[in-house]
Image (cartoon, rainbow, N blue to C red):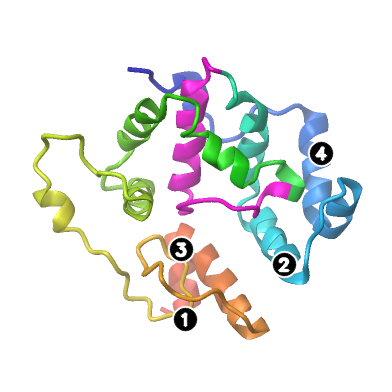
Amino acid sequence: MQKINSSIAKRKTAPLSAAQLKQLKLDAKNVRATAERKEVTLDKWEENDEMFHATHYFELGCWLFYYSARIYSPEGVADRIDCMRRIFEAGLDHLNYEFFSVFDFGERQFDTLVETGDAEAVIDGVRKRINDSWEGQNVRAAFKYMGWPIQPEGINMQQEHSMPTKCTHGISFCACSTCNRSQPRPDTDQDLMVFRESRAASTVGEQILKYLGI
């Protein structure tokens, strides 16, 4: 069984050069200009969505940039495990193109994490991160979203069935990792604002309390 590289897994910040970090920070400040430089087409909604993720998930984006090339190596299962667990622990259950223009990580890269012939090893490695912590519960919610078993085969599933499947924030378009995933995509500017704010709040407990006015 492959294990996560402990030295990398313990790092809070991605091991990027000063020049790389500086460029990412500049790109994150102006997603439209970055997309045009890279010849990426964005509509207004996509631009706002990428700007939101570049702002609220910048450190995760740095990790995605770091792993964007490393995940393709046949021997890179440990990298794929660590990349996926960081996505899930951040409260995101899948990726489309939210990080593409700035961090070069999109839907294709996300799918690659489990499409290199070692999906079982990757999933098993990430599954080990499920626990009672905030991050561990985010991983649990992501596994449910992906339809992956919470426990390996042969393990008693009673604990999984006892876990709540919805939060009680009562926010329209809430992006909390435990909320109902069947909600429609926000269409109006006001709904988009609520969606962004709720997603940011879902990753940090203090932000949730602040957003709800508690």
- SS at badge 3: helix
Mark number, residue 48: 2
Q: Residue visible at 37% across and 68% down?
A: 179
Query: Which residue is nearer to you in this view: 46 or 193?
Result: 46
Question: Start and end of the magenta stretch?
Answer: 74-100
**First along the sequence among labels 2 and 3:** 2
Q: What residue is disc 1 on?
A: 172
Answer whether residue 10 is visible to the viewer in this image. Answer: no
207 relative to 61, above or below: below
Of the residues under marks 3 and 4, which one precedes in the sequence? 4
Q: Position of residue 78 (x, y in %)?
A: 47, 22
Left or right, 181 with respect to 151, comes to right
Q: Are marks 2 and 3 in contact (CB under 8 Å)?
A: no
Residue on which disc 4 sits: 22
Q: Which residue is mark 3?
A: 202
Residue mark closest to the camera, 4 vs 1: 1
Which of labels 3 and 1 is toward the front? Answer: 1
